[in-house]
Amino acid sequence: MEFIKRLFKTNKKPSDSWTMFSTSKSEVKELLVSTGQLTIGDDFLKIENYPFEPSIAFRQNIFKTNQIDDIDFKSYPPTFRVGNEIIFLTSEKKVELEEFATKNNIKTVERSWIWDWILEPFLDTEYTTETDQRLTKLLGSYGLTNNQVKSLRAEVETQMLKYNFDTMLWEWGGFNALDVLRAIRTKYKKDEYEDFYRRVMEIALLTKKTDE
């Protein structure tokens, strides 16, 4: 992201009202939308005010243990899976979530970092040729071609830059599927977002290809 570096070759910090893409204050607020409120019951998870309309969690608040396929409490934020969909949870209750999974004998997993690798060029850090080659190889091991990765990055580039810089987030550690869903949510119309949401989930749940 060499143009980002050129923009900030100054000793002055941007003001609170500075935006790279003239993003409105209302959109900036929506870009950082909360994943809602989580209540952990004895045998259920309750999610209120989930922000992603295509999600089952937008229409359904309570998930009983027999609906939950697995839980990843080590990810940031923690997630659980229902069928072909990942639901994002608040990070404040990771310990309680682990206890909930153990108590109810729910399978625990550690999901792959596929979207983290796709979105790495949009972090506030140097993206080198060596990094690109390493990530291309990693993504290829999950069945994603170089052209597919380039197409995905081109699709989300402007929104991810808004998300990281116009919000003053300045994230350098890592992005994931939650971040790109937040970023694109303010751009696409309902049908476009439903299609994008489905693709995000499909990619997030890809499994590593085995050598034949």
Image (cartoon, helix red, strand yellow):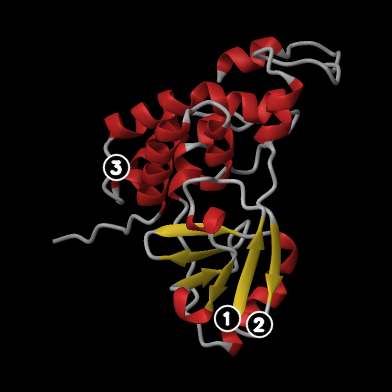
Q: How many C-alpha atoms fall within 10 Å of the one at disc 3: few (<14), some, or many (≥20)?
A: some
Tell me the distance, in whole angstroms, between the alpha carbons under discs 2 and 1: 5 Å
Q: Are marks 2 and 1 in contact (CB under 8 Å)?
A: yes
Answer left or right for 10 relative to 180.
right
The x, y position of residue 190, in whole percent, is: 46, 34
* Residue corresponding to mark 2: 99
Q: Residue at x 29, y 50 (%)?
A: 141
Q: Residue at x 42, y 23 (%)?
A: 154
Quadrant of the image containing the N terminus:
top right
Say what secondary structure mark 2 lies in.
helix
Residue tagged by mark 3?
144
**Residue position marked by numbered label 1 in the rendering:** 101
Quadrant location of residue 133?
top left
Q: Residues within 10 Å of mark 1 (few under 14, many from 20)?
A: some
Residue 50 coordinates in the image, percent (x, y) = 62, 52
Along the line of sight, which residue is nearer the eye, 25 or 143? Answer: 25
